[in-house]
Image (cartoon, rainbow, N blue to C red):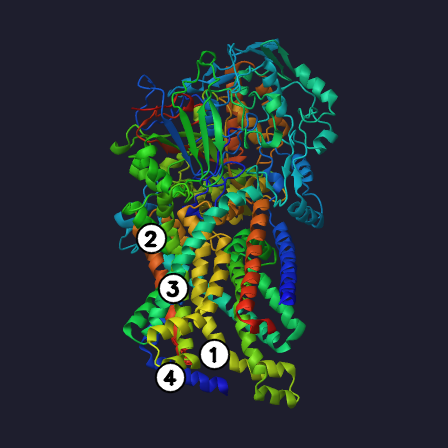
């Protein structure tokens, strides 16, 4: 009940917010392109256009990185693969990784946070220290160091080898290092909710613990969870790009924004557009998500100071 | 083989490693060349060759810029990378013999005496070699370089648990009994354990018998005839004074290597920002060293330079960079700026950049125990789109299409194998011949296989893998890529249990004799047998070639085995590697020294 | 108070212990065979095996862990076969056989770079973030506020490596406004030091500044709504006094503590900034070691970095307890 009315209120507020609506349209466009694009374009991972590049150094034959009607954003050095196609396919992989990781992060963070907050005592302390431990890890370093082994382990466990395993690794590892932040927020909320009358009433009525946790408390947590999720998604898109840039994650012949940026760096002087296209697409995507996230937060809590 | 380094293209590639050996980052392997005289193909030299060092004057500092984080090794017994051998050989580490400085490919791989008075005397039909030391050889502390110092240096090679990663010809060639099972278990490759094991009297006695010092004359007793042993002594036979030897850390920590060359190490730090500084060795006696010119006052090697800016700095060549030279290879994106084609530089860079053979033949090894059917192996080779693969690593700049394991710059041992033109009864285009491949599979009597392809995990290799999957796939062969962390590549693929069916590889000769190519690649001798081939008839043919003392007949023997290797497709030959390097405007001479595919460090100078 | 400190220190030690166990066992899974790294071409399986034994990598993980921890407190000796074995004095974090150097000395060499990088960026982001945050809060709802918010939004949406690359190429390579970055100690050549560090500082500071700007703005607005600030205003105190004396002091405490933790995190190495600007700090060291599977360095670095964060947590908590005694109760 709470959920539905809240949703309606939020939606009504969002609809009045022009920025929110605009960014929503942009985001929907991105998602649609990511879903539909691959059906319209051949996967550039497999299409090597040798005719577009020169045998001396693999340089695109046409100026500006080989921009032509056939390759509207140019081609990659050495392979002649279409950059526009790479962007579209890369967008899809980036979105899959970021949204899956966000989903798992939110589920983990919420469940563990509720549990810690409601159980209290030793359980709470142990979970708290465990979270401290995770947060103390230099996660970027760990992600880099463990990518080889853990990806292999995933492959051994039956995940298709190569990029599926790498993608899954990224999703899992981002989630593992991401959930404690949300869990802390949720735990704090639960601590205060626990004392509220409706929960006490439910306890008095002899409701089961699971019913109390997920029936009574959870619906009151949607606002902070939703806000957290809308801000985590763009953060993960950026993180995935950074990791790809450092060489972890999706690898050629497939690509993502970060991987494209990493490749294009070397050619910046000769073909600057190669860096700009994925770079600016990435920035637009993340800004749109963040703007929308802000709007959602405002809509959920108009009194808040933003 | 002379080893190469592999590069961390941090900017372009994210992560990519200095690996145990070559081609871990295929396509970005730098120059460093094995000795090789040229017959068929002359190494190309972009920019004018300036053999004449008449304009050379003493003084100044030459800066060596590299993206490597450190030297692979700084130890006379451990240095094994071509460029490093050239650098240290020209500055701080003398040997009995050395290669002549010359822009001419053939002359550049001819021997001259260094610490020895001549090129050595072979007796006993090539089984005993003696060298006499010059007068006036000194260490940097002023003491004399004695025969015992050389003997001690050689003995260190046997201490394989401490002195590792270096060339092991001393162990292979000297007349010392092989290891017992107990020796092998303890990590030794010989019954002699080197100077650090004090409880090995028998081994020590055997070594003392094999290497004998008599005044200024050092005599080596070999286990077989080796007519080219005076080439061998350029590799790992350097002198080390016993008192200065610190074992594991020798060379890398202060007081560094005890120098007997014209320079000495002043300081050495590794990593990004690290430097090695060489200053003049005041105790070096020029009279005892007609070989090294020792023009600059100082050498400064700068490590860990971002590849993004390394080329840029030398291309601009302002300030200190005017006298800088590149250790490594020009990035692909700059090749078009510097070169018109693989042989000519653009006007701005005339006389500053060189393009030529590196020491390496590249190939895809095939595990013959896993892919037993020769027709299948041939089908793989025929189906391969070698042109697309080459484009991906720089096109014509990356190398010529190879027809076997032996590279033309080795000299007499090379002869065209006819692999791609005539062996299959027709010419195989560089883009592959899918139809013929399908036909070969049919002839094999086996279904088209599914094969696992190993490669060091770098972005370039990942794309290469995609090309291989694509082109072999057209012929019906399913290829599953199995990327290996670059730092681990060779340790994995040498392990038959972990290795896939085929994968990337590369090899270069140690000196101009295919005895440093064929045996390591196709027999259990020499340890680079990625094909896991151990065939009695091949082993016998190799032994026969080794025993052949007539160099002309020996060359024919190597050519025959090379041809067989291509036809039997123990590995798929792909490219004879080329590489490109650049120097600042005020340094010379600019040519590729064919001995190591490197700069001729020992005669470089700062121009006016 | 003493009891509280004691309890927290005890907790920290437990955490450090758990951390060392976690790091050690986690990295033990890595494929990097340190024995393989010590032997090159003539590497026979037996030789690898012998080296493994010599380096102690054949022993059970637990024993290796003991040796490792023992090294931290009492020092260890490596390469016993060598005529001069390598004595690694306590605190010994290990020895890298591929770089022929103690992990500790590698870290000591890289640490100043990271330190200056982190501290410089820290000063920039705090100054910019807090002043813009206050500015926006005071202009709440007006165009200045919205502009600042917009800048902050773009700031934290830009992936730092993208900003870094663009700045690097334009400022250094295209326009040649600055020299190519090459780290020198500030005590050696201050001018060159600043010229090298300014871009990395900016890049590193952008993300944090954007974040702290928002944080400050929200904190200040919250405090300005508090009763005592209203009282102060009602008393007719000038706005400036109200903001500076009352609102800021109360509002900034959490910001400063959070900044302390962020700084501690950065001191472990700013991988991306160091990578882009080729700074020889801990982050570069980490990346290089990872690419080479140089296990001793990776383990040592991770442990050190994580310990730094745990200790910083303790310090911040203790400071907090001193400032605000109520904290101790929770």
Q: What element carries label 4?
A: helix
At which x and y percent is residue C179?
33, 43
Closer to the camera in the image, B493 or C195: C195
Q: Is residue B451 above or below residue B508?
A: below
Residue occupied by mark 1: A223
* Label 2 chain ID: C
Mark identifier at residue C166:
2
Closer to the camera in the image, A304 or B527: A304
**N-terminal-most mark, 4 or 1:** 4
Dots 1 and 2: beta carbons under 8 Å? Answer: no
- Quarter of the image with the C terminus of chain B in it: top left
**N-terminal-most mark, 2 or 3:** 3
Dots 2 and 3: beta carbons under 8 Å? Answer: no
Dots 3 and 1: beta carbons under 8 Å? Answer: no
3D distance between C-alphas at marks 4 and 2: 40 Å
At which x and y percent is residue A198?
57, 88
Mark identifier at residue A12:
4
Q: Is residue B414 visible?
A: no
* Label 3 chain ID: C
Residue occupied by mark 3: C129
3D distance between C-alphas at marks 2 and 3: 22 Å
Residue at the image point whose x is 35% and y is 66% from the top: C132
Q: Are marks 4 and 1 on the same chain?
A: yes
Q: Are marks 4 and 2 on the same chain?
A: no
């Amino acid at each position: 009940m709470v959920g539905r009315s809240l949703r309606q209120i939020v939606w009504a507020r969002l609809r009045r917010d022009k920025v929110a609506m605009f960014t929503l349209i942009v985001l929907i466009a991105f998602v649609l392109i990511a879903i539909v694009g691959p059906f319209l374009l051949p996967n550039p991972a497999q299409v090597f256009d040798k005719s577009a590049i020169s045998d001396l150094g693999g340089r695109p034959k046409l100026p500006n990185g080989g921009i032509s009607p056939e390759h509207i954003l140019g081609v990659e050095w050495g392979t002649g693969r279409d950059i526009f196609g790479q962007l579209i396919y890369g967008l899809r992989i980036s979105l899959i990784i970021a949204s899956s990781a966000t989903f798992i992060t939110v589920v983990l963070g919420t469940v563990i946070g509720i549990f810690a907050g409601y159980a209290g005592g030793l359980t709470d302390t142990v979970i708290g220290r465990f979270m401290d431990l995770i947060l103390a890890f230099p996660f970027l370093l760990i992600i880099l160091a463990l990518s080889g082994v853990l990806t292999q382990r995933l492959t051994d466990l039956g995940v298709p080898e190569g990029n599926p395993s790498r993608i899954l690794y990224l999703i899992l590892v981002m989630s593992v290092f991401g959930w404690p932040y949300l869990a802390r927020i949720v735990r704090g909320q639960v601590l205060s909710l626990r004392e509220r009358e409706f929960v006490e009433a439910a306890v008095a009525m002899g409701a089961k613990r699971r019913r109390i946790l997920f029936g009574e408390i959870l619906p009151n947590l949607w606002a902070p969870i939703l806000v957290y999720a809308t801000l985590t998604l763009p953060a993960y898109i950026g993180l995935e790009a950074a990791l790809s840039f450092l060489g972890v994650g999706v690898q050629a012949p497939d690509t993502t924004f970060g991987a494209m940026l990493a490749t294009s760096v070397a050619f910046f002087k000769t073909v600057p557009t190669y860096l700009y296209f994925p770079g600016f697409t990435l920035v637009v995507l993340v800004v749109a998500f963040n703007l929308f996230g802000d709007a959602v937060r405002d809509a959920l809590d108009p009194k808040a100071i933003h | 083989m002379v080893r190469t380094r592999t590069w961390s293209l941090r900017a372009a590639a994210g992560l990519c490693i200095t690996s145990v050996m070559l081609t871990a980052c295929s396509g970005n392997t730098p120059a460093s060349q094995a000795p090789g005289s040229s017959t068929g193909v002359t190494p190309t030299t972009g920019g004018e060759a300036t053999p004449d060092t008449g304009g050379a004057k003493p003084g100044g500092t030459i800066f060596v810029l590299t993206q490597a984080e450190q030297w692979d090794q700084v130890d006379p017994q451990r240095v094994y990378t071509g460029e490093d051998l050239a650098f240290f050989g020209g500055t701080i580490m003398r040997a009995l013999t050395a290669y002549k400085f010359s822009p001419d490919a053939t002359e550049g791989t001819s021997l001259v005496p260094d610490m020895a008075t001549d090129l050595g005397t072979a007796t006993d039909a090539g089984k005993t070699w003696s060298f006499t030391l010059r007068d006036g050889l000194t260490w940097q502390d002023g003491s004399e370089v004695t025969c015992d110092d050389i003997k001690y240096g050689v003995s260190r090679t046997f201490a394989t648990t401490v002195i590792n990663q270096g060339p092991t010809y001393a162990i292979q060639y000297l007349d010392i009994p092989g290891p017992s099972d107990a020796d092998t278990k303890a990590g030794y490759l010989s019954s002699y354990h080197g100077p650090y094991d004090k409880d090995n009297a028998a081994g020590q006695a055997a070594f003392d018998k094999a290497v004998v010092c008599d005044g200024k004359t050092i005599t080596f007793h070999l286990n077989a005839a080796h007519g080219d042993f005076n080439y061998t002594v350029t590799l790992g036979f350097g002198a080390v004074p016993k008192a200065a030897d610190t074992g594991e850390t020798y060379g890398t920590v202060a007081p560094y290597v005890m120098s007997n060359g014209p320079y000495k190490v002043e300081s050495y730090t590794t990593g990004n920002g690290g430097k090695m500084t060489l200053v003049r060795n005041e105790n070096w006696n020029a009279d005892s060293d007609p070989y090294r010119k020792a023009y600059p006052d100082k050498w400064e090697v700068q490590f860990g330079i971002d590849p993004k800016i390394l080329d840029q700095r030398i291309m601009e060549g302002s300030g200190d960079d005017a006298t800088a030279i590149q250790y490594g290879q020009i990035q692909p994106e700059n090749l078009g700026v510097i070169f018109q084609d693989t042989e000519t530089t653009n006007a701005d860079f005339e006389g500053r950049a060189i393009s030529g053979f590196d020491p390496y033949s590249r190939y895809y090894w095939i595990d013959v125990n896993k892919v037993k059917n020769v027709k299948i192996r041939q089908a793989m080779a025929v189906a391969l789109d070698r042109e697309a693969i080459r484009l991906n690593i720089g096109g014509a700049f990356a190398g010529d299409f190879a027809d076997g394991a032996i590279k033309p710059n080795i000299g007499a041992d090379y002869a065209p194998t006819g692999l791609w033109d005539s062996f299959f009864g027709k010419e195989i285009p560089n883009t592959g011949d899918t139809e013929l491949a399908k036909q070969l599979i049919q002839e094999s009597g086996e279904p088209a296989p599914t094969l696992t392809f190993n490669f060091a995990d770098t972005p370039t290799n990942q794309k290469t893998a995609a090309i291989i999957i694509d082109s072999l796939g057209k012929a019906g062969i399913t290829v599953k890529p199995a990327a290996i962390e670059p730092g681990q590549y060779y340790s994995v693929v040498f392990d038959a249990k972990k290795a896939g069916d085929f994968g990337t590889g590369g090899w270069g000769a140690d000196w101009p004799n295919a005895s440093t190519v064929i045996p390591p690649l196709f027999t259990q001798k020499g340890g680079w047998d990625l094909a896991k081939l151990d065939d009695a008839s091949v082993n016998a043919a190799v032994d026969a070639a080794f025993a052949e003392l007539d160099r002309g007949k020996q060359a024919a023997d190597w050519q025959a085995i090379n041809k067989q290797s291509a036809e039997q497709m123990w590995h798929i030959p792909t490219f004879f590697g080329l590489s490109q390097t650049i120097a600042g405007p005020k340094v010379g001479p600019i040519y590729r020294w064919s001995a190591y595919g490197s700069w001729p460090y020992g005669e470089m100078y700062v121009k006016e | 108070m003493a009891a509280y400190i004691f309890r927290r220190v005890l907790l920290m030690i437990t955490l450090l212990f758990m951390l060392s166990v976690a790091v050690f066992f986690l990295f033990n899974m890595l494929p990097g065979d340190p024995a393989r790294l010590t032997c090159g071409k003539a590497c026979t399986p037996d030789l690898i095996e012998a080296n493994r034994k010599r380096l102690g990598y054949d022993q059970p993980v637990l024993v290796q862990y003991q040796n490792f921890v023992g090294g931290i407190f009492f020092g260890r000796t490596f390469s016993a076969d060598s005529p001069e074995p390598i004595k690694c004095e306590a605190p010994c974090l290990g020895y890298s056989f591929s770089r022929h150097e103690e992990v500790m000395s590698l870290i000591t060499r890289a640490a100043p770079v990271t330190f200056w990088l982190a501290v410089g960026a820290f000063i920039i982001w705090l100054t910019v973030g807090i002043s813009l945050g206050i500015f926006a809060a005071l202009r709440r709802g007006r165009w200045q506020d919205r502009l600042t918010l917009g800048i902050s939004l773009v700031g934290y949406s830009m992936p730092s490596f993208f900003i870094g690359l663009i700045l690097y190429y334009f400022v250094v390579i295209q326009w040649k406004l600055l020299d190519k970055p090459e780290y020198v100690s500030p005590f050696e050549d201050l001018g060159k030091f600043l010229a090298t560090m300014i871009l990395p500082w900016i890049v590193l500071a952008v993300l944090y500044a954007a974040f702290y700007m928002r944080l400050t703005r929200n904190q200040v607005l919250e405090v300005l709504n508090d009763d005592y600030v209203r009282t102060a205003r009602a008393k007719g105190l000038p706005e400036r006094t109200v903001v500076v004396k009352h609102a800021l002091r109360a509002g900034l405490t959490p910001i400063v503590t959070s900044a302390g933790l962020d700084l501690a995190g950065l001191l472990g190495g700013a991988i991306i900034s160091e990578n882009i600007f080729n700074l020889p700090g801990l982050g570069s060291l980490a990346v290089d070691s990872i690419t080479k599977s140089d296990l001793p360095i990776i383990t040592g670095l991770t442990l050190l970095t994580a310990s730094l964060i745990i200790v910083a947590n303790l310090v911040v908590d203790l400071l907090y307890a001193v400032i605000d005694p109520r904290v101790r109760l929770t």
